[in-house]
Amino acid sequence: MATLHKKSILPYWSAKDMAGHCQRDLCLGYSDPLRGFVIVQCAADQAEILTIVTDPDHRKSGIAGSVLSAAEDNLSARGVTIIFLEVAEDNNPAIAFYRSAGFEPFGKRPAYYRRETGRVAALTFRKRLDA
Ligand SMILES: CC(C)(COP(=O)(O)OP(=O)(O)OC[C@H]1O[C@@H](n2cnc3c(N)ncnc32)[C@H](O)[C@@H]1OP(=O)(O)O)[C@@H](O)C(=O)NCCC(=O)NCCS
């Protein structure tokens, strides 16, 4: 998981960080060798996607859609009714992915992510599972 995250140029989470997430959170992966995974934090009837990633060599083949759909089934079964997430406003592939999966934008956190060229806002999205 750490290797895939690093390969995707996402913030560095070590193997130890990932092991912690696997103990605390819902972590679902796609295939062996691992081509993609999602980490979701749950609290009562709410959940937050902490990260979702597909191996850059295997994108646009339905992997993230597949792990997200499996996560939603799992979350629904444990009584979660709404999922939240935040995404950088310059991350167009992820925004397109979340929109295609039925997430709706509802807010903006200015200057949330640091970039070499400055800061960019985070967009907040949500999806009701009980709609
Ligand atoms: C966002 C990400 C997880 C999508 O993974 P993926 O496995 O390629 O996505 P899927 O193949 O399941 O795509 C499902 C749908 O999402 C949309 N989508 C996915 N990638 C897209 C892109 N680059 N441009 C436009 N739409 C896209 C499409 O509607 C796609 O359906 P289609 O292939 O029938 O057109 C992947 O691009 C990634 O790992 N990005 C880097 C990590 C990241 O930014 N994660 C989000 C952090 S908040």
Image: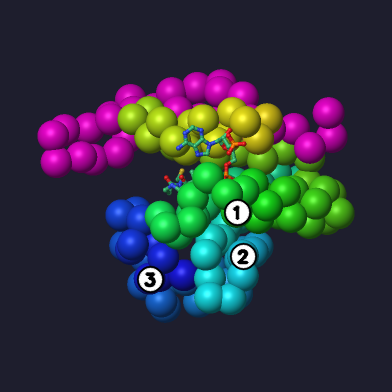
Q: Is mark 3 within 8 Å of ligand 1?
A: no
- In the rendered image, which residue does mark 2 sit on? 30
Of labels 3 and 2, earlier in sequence is 3
Q: Percent x, y for residue 14? A: 36, 72
Quadrant of res 4: bottom left
Is 1 on the left or on the right of 38, as rendered? Answer: left
Closer to the camera in the image, 117 or 25 = 117
Q: Nearer the viewer, residue 32 or 86?
A: 32
| Disc 2 crowd, CA 10 A, few/some/many (<14, 14-19, 20+) | some
Magenta span: predominant SS is strand
Instruction: Give the labeled residue for mark 1.
Output: 63
In the rendering, at what x and y percent does residue 2 appear? 40, 70
Dot 1 falls on a residue whose secondary structure is helix
Mark 3: amino acid: Thr
Q: Position of residue 97 (x, y in %)?
A: 55, 36
Q: Quadrant of the C terminus?
A: top right
User: Which residue is painted at 49% across and 31% down in the image?
Assistant: 95
Q: Residue at x 74, y 55 (%)?
A: 70
- From which residue to which does the magenta span run? 103-131
Question: Residue 3 got which mark?
Answer: 3
Give the residue at x 53% y 75%.
33
Q: Are marks 1 and 3 in contact (CB under 8 Å)?
A: no
Quick one: label 1 or label 3, which is nearer the N terminus? 3
**CA distance separating discs 1 and 3:** 17 Å
Crowd rating for badge 1 (residues with CA inside 10 Å; few <14, some 14–19, many 20+): many
* Marks 1 and 2 in Cβ contact (< 8 Å): yes
**Drawn side of residue 88 relative to residue 120, left or right:** right
Relative horizontal placement of residue 79, taking residue 96 as reference (left or right): right
